[in-house]
Image: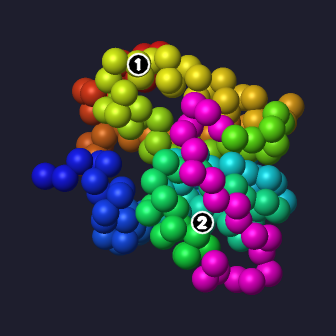
Amino acid sequence: MPTFEEIYRSHAQTYDQLVSREDHQGNILPTLRRICPLEGMSVLELGAGTGRLSKLIAPLTQRLIISDLSPAMLQVAVSALDGQTQTQNPTAALIANNDALPLCDQAVEVVLAGWSLGHTIGWYPDSWPERIRRTLEQMRRVTRPGGMLIIIETLGTGFEVPTPPPILIPYYDL
């Protein structure tokens, strides 16, 4: 079975086809808009991957910056976003680690991290708590006063009540 790193490096298109069907009921965007109205906002998406969330929010935002460690994943996202309506503002794409963002202080109004921070546990098993702390610090640093941080993670797949995967429980306990 391929690792996440291999999937993200070599199978980005296939990954995108898989995750693009997960929200078949269309719940994600209305939920995000209830949390924070995104219209006219400047937004940074961490761990954007192939643009699953980016494609939903790009038409609403005034400015969208997407970041990911995988150039292959970002390329899929950028291609998809380029194919959306030409009236929206352009999207900037950065190859960056969540805990070392190459942005100035107070650069955006909203930072969104969807299913990204949890991967820190698998990729950095010996240093994940510190890396997640640094990521949260970076998220706060680049967010303007009064802005919002939104973190989306899995609480289990195929369960009626929240049942986080055992590997993520220590992360949720931070």
Circle 1 or circle 2, nearest the eye: 1
Quadrant in which residue 112 is drawn: top right
Q: Does the image show residue 15?
A: no
Predominant SS of the magenta segment:
loop
Q: Which residues are magenta?
A: 82-101
State the mark number for residue 58.
none
The residue beneath circle 1 is 127
Tag 1 and tag 2, C-beta contact below 8 Å: no
In the image, residue 169 above or below residue 62: above
- Density class for disc 1 (Cα within 10 Å; few <14, some 14-19, many ≥20) is few
Q: CA distance from mark 1 to mark 2?
A: 32 Å
- Helix, strand or loop at mark 2: helix
Please give left or right for residue 4 compared with residue 16 in the image: left
Q: Residue at x 57, y 45 (%)?
A: 96
- Helix, strand or loop at mark 1: loop
- N-term-proximal mark, 1 vs 2: 2
- Density class for disc 2 (Cα within 10 Å; few <14, some 14-19, many ≥20) is some
- 154 magenta-colored: no
Q: Position of residue 115 (x, y in %)?
A: 45, 44
Q: Position of residue 94 (x, y in %)?
A: 63, 53
Which of the two residues, 98 or 34, is positioned nearer the viewer here?
98
Quadrant in which residue 93 is drawn: bottom right
Q: Residue at x 31, y 63 (%)?
A: 10
Q: Amino acid at mark 1?
A: Ser
Please give left or right for residue 53 compared with residue 87 in the image: left
Q: Position of residue 130 (x, y in %)?
A: 49, 17
Q: Amino acid at mark 2?
A: Leu
Q: Does the image show residue 45?
A: yes
Please give left or right for residue 154 compared with residue 36 in the image: left
- 83 magenta-colored: yes
The residue beneath circle 2 is 56
